[in-house]
Image (cartoon, grey):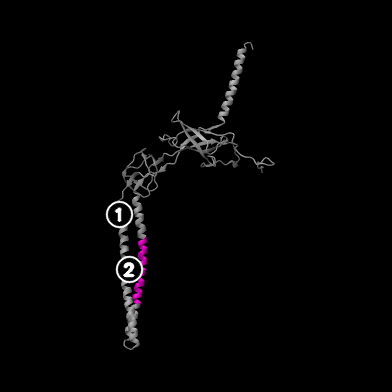
């Protein structure tokens, strides 16, 4: 080459490329990333446990709510009437037991008097001062008193069973009456609200959702990228909605199955039409405390997590001793 400076420049350029390529490779081998990741969470459906007509609504769509905050109320008329009716029946049953117990005491007093008279007449009969008819009459009266006591005791047991049933019914009525006030299950934001005043609602029908502020990221990593991913690995999370802002988190768990296995129609490779497809495994990433104080992350947002891994951590340990340590094929 005629110009030595040009040769030196080419060598320096090649050296810079080699060094830069090595540095880039060394840096990238510590990072695992994917664009197949979204913000996930657990929305709580707002439903009612009893049927009724909505008479008051206290929230609007996309409103922040607190746990225990009243969302809406149902008409209490029917449930209040039933509660009052069952409470009246319970009170009647209790009074009936009191009356029967008072009657038992009266019959028991009568029984004691008859037994006393029977003893007295028996002594007189032995002395010849009383007739046999009087003795028979007292014995029949004593037998009748015992029968009345037994009947009253049976009636009291039946009434006590009725009291237990009425008490349970009143407790259920009060519980149903409390269900007419629907509360927020968690702190979060009311979303997809469909409840309005005057709407007749049935149990189990979603009337909206309370989306909690606690969210996480589900990253669907390729199986070939899981080698060095471990629980606790730090993660930088870039969100498409907020360019330039980085959220921080850490790996919490790796799903035991691939996403395809848990799908509605999992693949069946035993049919003979096998084509190898790189599978993806869901990895849960939780945000570090204080990362999202303004609750900017919302369910379904697309994110790009970058997991910091340690490639020097061996992916598995081989068994010591003779042989390769791998199982033999059949």
- Mark number displayed over residue 101: 2
Q: Mark 1 points at which residue?
A: 81
Residues packed near mark 2 inside 10 Å, few (<14), some (14 to 19) or many (20 plus): some
- Quadrant of the rendered image containing residue 196: top left
Q: In this view, does 259 lie above or below 112?
A: above
| Residues drawn in magenta | 143-164
Q: Is mark 2 on a helix, strand or loop?
A: helix
Q: Is residue 294 above or below residue 203?
A: above
Can you give x and y, in whole percent of width and height, for residue 171 in the image? Answer: 35, 56
Query: Is-magenta flag for residue 290?
Result: no
- Quadrant of the rendered image containing residue 90: bottom left
Q: Residue at x 61, y 15 (%)?
A: 8
Query: How far separated are the C-alphas under marks 1 and 2?
Result: 31 Å
Q: In this view, does 315 lie to the left or right of 284?
A: right
321 or 305, which lies in front? 321
- Quadrant of the rendered image containing residue 226: top right
Q: Is residue 319 left or right of residue 43?
A: right
First along the sequence among labels 1 and 2: 1
Whether tag 1 and tag 2 are in contact, CB under 8 A, the answer is: no
């Amino acid at each position: 080459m005629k110009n030595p400076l040009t040769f030196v420049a080419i060598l320096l350029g090649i050296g810079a490329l080699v060094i830069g390529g090595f540095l880039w490779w060394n840096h990238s081998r510590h990072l695992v990333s994917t664009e197949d990741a979204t913000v996930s969470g657990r929305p709580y459906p707002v439903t009612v446990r009893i049927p009724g007509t909505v008479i008051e609504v206290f929230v609007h769509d996309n409103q922040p709510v607190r746990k225990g905050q009243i969302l809406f109320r149902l008409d209490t008329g029917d449930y209040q009437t039933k509660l009052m009716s069952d409470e009246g029946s319970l009170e009647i049953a209790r009074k009936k037991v009191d009356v029967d117990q008072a009657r038992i005491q009266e019959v028991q007093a009568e029984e004691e008097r008859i037994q006393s008279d029977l003893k007295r007449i028996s002594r007189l009969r032995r002395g010849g001062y009383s007739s046999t008819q009087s003795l028979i009459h007292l014995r029949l009266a004593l037998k009748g008193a015992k029968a009345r006591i037994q009947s009253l005791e049976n009636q009291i047991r039946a009434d006590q069973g009725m009291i237990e049933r009425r008490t349970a019914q009143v407790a259920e009525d009060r519980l149903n009456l409390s269900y007419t006030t629907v509360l927020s299950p968690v702190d979060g934001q009311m979303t997809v609200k469909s409840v309005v005043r005057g709407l007749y609602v049935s149990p189990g029908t979603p009337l909206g959702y309370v989306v909690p502020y606690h969210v996480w990221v589900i990253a669907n990593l390729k199986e070939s990228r899981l080698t060095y991913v471990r629980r606790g690995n730090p993660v930088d999370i870039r969100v498409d909605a907020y360019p330039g802002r980085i959220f921080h988190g850490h790996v919490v768990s790796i799903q035991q199955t691939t996403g395809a296995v848990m799908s509605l129609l999992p693949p069946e490779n035993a049919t003979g039409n096998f084509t190898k497809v790189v599978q993806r495994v869901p990895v849960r990433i939780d945000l570090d405390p204080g990362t999202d104080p303004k609750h900017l992350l919302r369910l379904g947002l697309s994110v790009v997590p970058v997991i910091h891994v340690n490639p020097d951590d061996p992916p598995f340990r081989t068994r010591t001793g003779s042989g390769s340590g791998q199982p033999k094929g059949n």
